[in-house]
Amino acid sequence: MKVLKELNRCSLSARELFLAARDSPEAGVRARLTLVRCLAKYQNVNTVFKALSDPTRRRVLQLLRERPMSAGELSDHFPVSKPTMSAHFAVLQQAGLIDAEKSGRTIVYRLVMSVLEEALLGFAQTFGWGPDSGRSSRVTNRRAARRPVKGEA
Amino acid sequence: MVPNSMMFRAASALTAIGVALVLANWYAKPQQALAWTAPLAMFAVMAAALWVSRLILRRSTGNATARRSLDYITTAVVFAALMMGIPLAMTLARSYGVVDDVDLGRRSTGVLIGVFLAMLGNVMPKHLPPLASMGCDGARAQAFQRLAGWTWVLCGLGSAIGWLALSMDSAETATMVLVVTAMAVTIVQLLRLRRPRKDQPAPGLN
């Protein structure tokens, strides 16, 4: 528990980590864990996995694979409120998977995924990452199927 | 503004190690003095590039473009120093009789070049120009960059695996075939991108 609390700090310099590791074995383990956490933060890995763990966000990425789309166009594909979609866009943007560009009064989103991130998306889609993602994606698909397509009605 | 210290330190350290390796090789084989001046000059250029870019970054306050440029330069210097440092270390080891394998240096350099190509391809789809400045359809440009990224990642990984697993001659041929194929695919796709599509004549997002 103490180690977990220490993990949340992540403010030690490399020299402090080295000295801590030298002084005591317990501190050494803690220092190594902190270093791993610092590296994970540096690599932005956490945010990418978090972004890919949600089926709605994965669907957004799949839609953006085809072409850049405005926020409204993307929202039309999902049976959720616009603020919820905005939150999803923010998570994706924070992870560096999509890029927003203002065009007049609309915001256009486009994909800026690296090849590795795209491969991760493929894995996530295949194996259904995230808590009860299978159920939520089924629900989303069912709701989307019930919803009339814009322009058809 | 402080540069990305970890990468910058790695680049500086590798450049210094490279210079030390060149001097050690020079000491071991003084009769080839002329041959050692070329890598020495290249390491000097790398050190100068690092120093100048750091100076420029310090003068620019809060400029994200300058930071990105320094990141590119430091990454390039790290890979260049590794590509030159590994054969230099192998040559030095051979001249002192530590290593007998003649091909080890070439193999390791080949693997490194493959990894470099894969890393370059990996970040290729991330660098898209602004939609407004595009001279073609945004969707097509995105598709081109994704395809180019995948092509170069697969080429780089194939090349690295080839240098690890195949014989020297086969690895050289395989690398050549892979790189030429990747270049051909990229150029063909780029030419197709420049050709205007009949159904979507307007540039940018439609």
Image: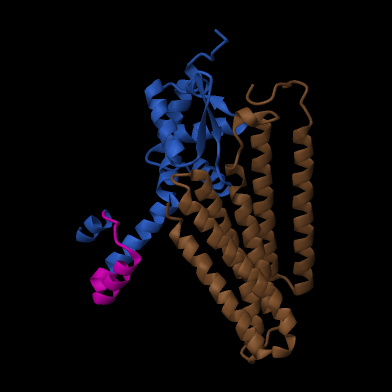
Chain colours: A blue, B brown
Q: What residue is shown at x 32% (from left), y 71% (from top)?
A: A18
Q: Is residue B72 left or right of residue A24?
A: right
Q: Position of residue B10 (x, y in %)?
A: 50, 66
Q: Nearer the viewer, residue B7 or B69?
A: B69
Q: What residue is shown at x 67% (from left), y 58% (from top)?
A: B156
Query: From which residue to which does the magenta span run?
Result: A9-28
Q: Is residue A42 left or right of residue B95?
A: left
Q: Position of residue B18 (x, y in %)?
A: 59, 75
Q: Is A37 contained in the magenta span?
A: no
As drawn, the residue found furthest toward the left would be A2
What quarter of the picture does the C terminus of chain B occupy? top right
Q: Is residue B194 above or below residue A38?
A: above
Q: Quadrant of residue B157?
A: bottom right
Q: What residue is shown at x 57% (from left), y 80% (from top)?
A: B20
Q: Is residue A27 above or below residue A112?
A: below
Q: Is residue B150 above or below residue B104?
A: above
